[in-house]
Image: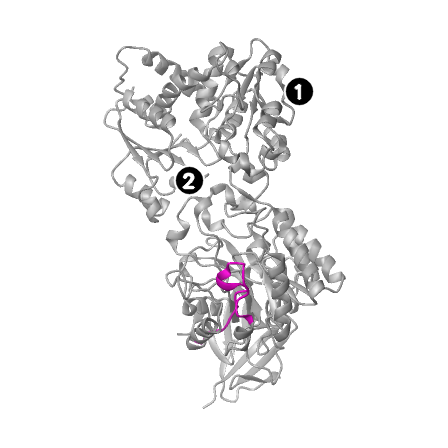
Amino acid sequence: MKHLLSAADLSRDEAEQILATAAQMHDVQRREVKKLPVLRGRTVVNLFFEDSTRTRSSFEIAGKWLSADVINVSAKGSSVSKGESLRDTVMTVAAMGVDALVIRHHASGAPSQVTQWVDAAVVNAGDGTHEHPTQALLDAYTMRSKLGDLAGRRVGIIGDLTHSRVVRSNLILLRTLGAEVTLVAPPTLMPSGIADWAGAAGFSYSYDFDEVLPELDAAMMLRVQKERMTGGFFPTPREYTVGYGLTRERLRALPEHAVICHPGPMNRGLEITADAADEARSLILDQVSAGVAVRMSVLYHLLGGAEQA
Amino acid sequence: MSESYLIKGADLLGAGRQDVLVDDGVITEVGRVTAKGATVIDADGLVALPGLVDLHTHLREPGREDAETVATGSAAAAAGGYTAILAMANTSPVTDTAEAAERVFDLGRARGLVDVQPIGAVSKGLAGEELAELGLMARSRAAVRVFSDDGHCVHDARLMRRALEYVKAFGGVVSQHAQEPRLADKSACCHEGELSGRLGLPGWPGVAEEVIVARDVMLARHTGSRVHVAHVSTAGSVEVIRWAKSQGIAVTAEVTPHHLMLDTTKLTSYDPTYKVNPPLRPAEDIAELRKALADGTIDAVATDHAPHARHDKEHAFAEAAFGMLGLEQALQVVNTVMVQPGLLTWAQVAEVMSVTPARIAGLTGHGRPLEAGEPANLTLIDPAATVTVDGAASHSLSRNNPWHDMTLTGAVQTTLLRGRPTLLDQEVSQ
């Protein structure tokens, strides 16, 4: 594996390996001294074309705990806003001699395009409304920590699916790991061509959360982007919550063993109530914690740490 | 001293071998002709067509001469077998005055490789608010007859109605870029469907084109005017146009070579070369477009030749410029997807790539039959040659060539504009 651009880049074996290594990294994370020497002398650049404190910090800590030199470059509002092309920006950074580029971009496909221009390993840290593969890995890691093997488990992904990069990666990875996936959203927030996609990729979808809810082993709630509320996707926040929010009533209908996930940041009271977010079976903070371990594992595998160790 | 050329043994529109004698810009004899001292062009195995006419070319001059100039676009056109091209108005400044139109017209005449006929903007600055000086452009030396805000849709129904009414005074036609902006907004960058959903790219649904085509044919009926649908891309639009024609509404339509050949699957690479407006559509639409061109529902092939400097394409897909090159490979693509599979004869190719475009644009000197007494605007193609396209060898200043590295059937050998070779044995005249 040269790059991690999409969850589809991972075979089941590769995904299992990354998750297994992440478990080891998670143990390291709990030590007093967290550093491992495996990427000493390697340089990782976090090239972020849009803000993301959570993901950038997570990659930064991951790189540093592996002893890599980590540099953060915010391309937002710098050369790019002066009209520089993506290629020129990336080539400039790559010319400094980097081993891995961790790229967050507001446009889908940008990290894939970058691989045509640079030799460095490229990690997609979220591209537009396309994918966020390390988020999917950390979600799977977290769910497995409570549910065990995900094969045959039923995961519902509920919310603004059209604009979510998380859903696409999760869908692919969860299917790779053998889980059954159901997407839930109002028709206006379903990705286009959902029927064809679902048929080809082997997942289901529904416009009715209450119908799906009692069967779930995991409910993954996605953020509703408040800025889009005026886009005509649904009439009012109240109506959205009634139809698709993880409310107190729905919490009761969710099977007791089922877990709750949310990639954050949350809109409490909109897609998820405070009760649900703070429940014992809510894994939301575990997801954040797992993020560092999973990203350590990804960098370790991509940069040949596995061979050196 | 007059220039004489004797084209020996050309297959005239695919109807049999003939010699064509050209003297002083005019075809003087067709049949079995003796040389009489004329320069001989060996056309054995080549098909002769009237010089091609492109209803839809973007030349970037004035404003973006780093992407294309009238001169380089003209060279690309000659290399593709064209003798006349219509230059879209979305230059900088916009071609929305008589002076601007005459400037483009004059630049074309100065280079002399093809007749460059400017298209005038429908609205001032392409802003879609007030009519541009349509009448002054029509009465100018450039004699503008086609008006378009291409790149933008004339989405205000009242403005479209006024434009259609106004151009009747001078036999003009409005060429519409059909894109309802509330259904396919500025972010829309590829066909809306399963693939755009999977790739996370903002979709451009076919219905955004179809609702404007439907509205415009009704406006054309109401006004009794002519409307032309630029770059038709969906089966739904074809259905509307077919119905409109059955009702006697004066609608014509064009399809691009890329919409006849390339489908949405090209997007999986996120390569912005394939980002075009309207977007590439699925195979089912392509099949309907081919059928509609063959049965006459779609009247013409037009390239939508849209050169872009490299740095305008080297962005993330959603942020890269729309458009791809078209002039040099259009005839090869039509040969590959329409003639070779038996969907069009060469006589029909002459209709859709020369005769009808010239008629729609009011260009009386082009799209004429290859007969004695007619202007010697013609092109010769080797229909059997297989060519792997080298995008780097383009005459365009730009390199956004979707056919690069693809193998197409046919090679344009020679183009004559008023009896003078602008392309001879694949070499563009200097």
Question: Which residue position holds label 1?
Answer: A211
Colouring method of the image: one colour
- Label 2 with label 1: CB-CB less than 8 Å: no
The part of the chain drawn in magenta is: B112-134
Q: Name the element at disc 1.
A: helix
Q: Is residue B125 magenta?
A: yes
Q: Which residue occupies the foreground of this view, A305 or A32? A: A32
| Residue A72 position in % (x across, y down) | 29, 32
Which chain does tag 1 point to? A
Which chain does tag 2 point to? A
State the residue at coordinates (36%, 20%). A292
Quarter of the image where one finds residue A229: top right
Disc assigned to residue A110: 2
Tell me if mark 2 has few (under 14), some (14-19) or many (20+) residues whose alpha carbon lies within 10 angstroms of its own: many
As shown in the figure, which amino acid type bears the numbered disc 1?
Glu
Q: Is residue A26 left or right of residue A264?
A: left
State the residue at coordinates (40%, 19%). A288
Residue B134 in view (yes/no)? yes
Q: Is residue A290 left or right of residue B378?
A: left
For marks 2 and 1 on the same chain, the one whose residue lies earlier in the sequence: 2
Say if B11 sits above or below A115 in the image.
below
| Residue B192 position in % (x across, y down) | 58, 43
Predominant SS along the magenta part: loop
Quarter of the image where one finds residue A43: top left
Say yes or no: labels 2 and 1 on the same chain: yes
Tell me if mark 1 has few (under 14), some (14-19) or many (20+) residues whose alpha carbon lies within 10 angstroms of its own: few
Q: Name the element at disc 2.
A: helix
As shown in the figure, which amino acid type bears the numbered disc 2?
Ala
| Residue A76 position in % (x across, y down) | 35, 39
